[in-house]
Amino acid sequence: MANTVSGNTIAEVAALMGDPARANILSALMGGQALTAGELAYHAGVTAQTTSGHLAKLLDARLIALERQGRHRYYHLATFEVAEALQALMAVAAAGPARHHPVGPRDAALRIARTCYDHLAGRLALALADRLCEQGYIVLADGAGLVTEDGRRFLADFGISLDDAPGRRPLCRTCLDWSERRPHLAGRLGAALLTRLLELGWLVRTPDSRALRITPAGHRGLAATFDLPPHWDEPVTPDAPRFQEVRSAPST
């Protein structure tokens, strides 16, 4: 087949992602924001000169892209497929053997709410997906999602018009959450939902992190609008109900 990718090509891409500094650069860009070389050097933990070499390799491989605004240069992930590949690697790494990496406050914040490229991840994302399913606004199965008519009306009242979210990506799909091992919402709907929560000021970005902070107004608004259950931010116990019938390929 003409489109078959050779093992050598896969190995080359894997080797580029496998370098710790480059992996940290790509992970930082999973926050969905374009970053400067200086900001990426901070995340990579290497010098500016070393970062420049890493960025050149990632650009050549089309894993990242460059945008210029005046004298400023900003880097972002080249495609959604790159983001999905990184998310899959995060899921595999999270499911691997235990490693010496003490969990700190920053890790706890990431587990509550964070960006997964252009959509929401973490326990908040799972709670929202669960409630939208329970209320009959979306139907999830086999990694894909369907927005019902009631769902379209609910989302429109919330300020999200699905007609204003065109694109080549699916409208609604699932993405396996690497920290919680359950699917959250991705696709154009997932991106629109994150954008709306940020616009309302219910979520705010945390500097130098993918973590999102829920504001006091956000706690009130999320509870009232989505009718979130008590203790939604706590880990799901083995006996708690889950949408296990939803099957999803890792993609956050």
Image (cartoon, rainbow, N blue to C red):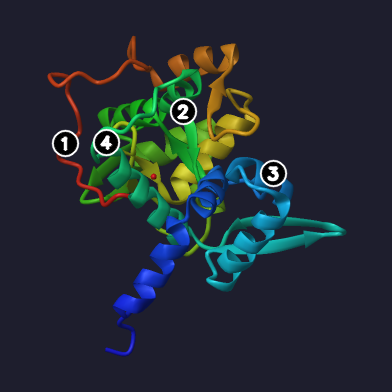
State the image quarter where residue 243 is shown: top left
Which mark sits nearer the N-terminus, 1 or 4? Answer: 4
Contact check, label 2 and label 1, Cβ < 8 Å: no
| Residue depicted at x 30% and y 82% | 4
Q: Nearer the viewer, residue 199 or 94?
A: 94
Which mark sits nearer the N-terminus, 3 or 2? Answer: 3
Instruction: In the rendered view, tell whether residue 213 sits above or below residue 17.
Output: above
Q: Which residue is mark 1?
A: 244
Secondary structure, mark 2, is: helix
Marks 3/4: CA distance?
Answer: 30 Å
| Residue depicted at x 38% and y 41% | 185
* Res 85 seen here: yes
Residue at the far left: name it: 239
Secondary structure, mark 4, is: loop
Amino acid, disc 1: Gln
Across and down, in percent, residue 210 comes to 54, 35
Query: How many neighbours does mark 1 have within 10 angstroms: few (below 14), some (14-19), or many (20 or more)?
Result: few
Across and down, in percent, residue 89 comes to 35, 50
Viewer-nearest of discs 2 and 1: 2
Viewer-nearest of discs 3 and 2: 3
Q: Which mark is residue 110?
A: 2
Residue at the far right: name it: 70
Amino acid, disc 2: Leu
Contact check, label 3 and label 4, Cβ < 8 Å: no
Marks 4/2: CA distance?
Answer: 14 Å
Q: Which residue is mark 3?
A: 39
Secondary structure, mark 3, is: helix
Q: Nearer the viewer, residue 69 or 53?
A: 53
Across and down, in percent, residue 116 comes to 47, 42
Q: Which mark is residue 181?
A: 4
Across and down, in percent, residue 153 comes to 44, 37
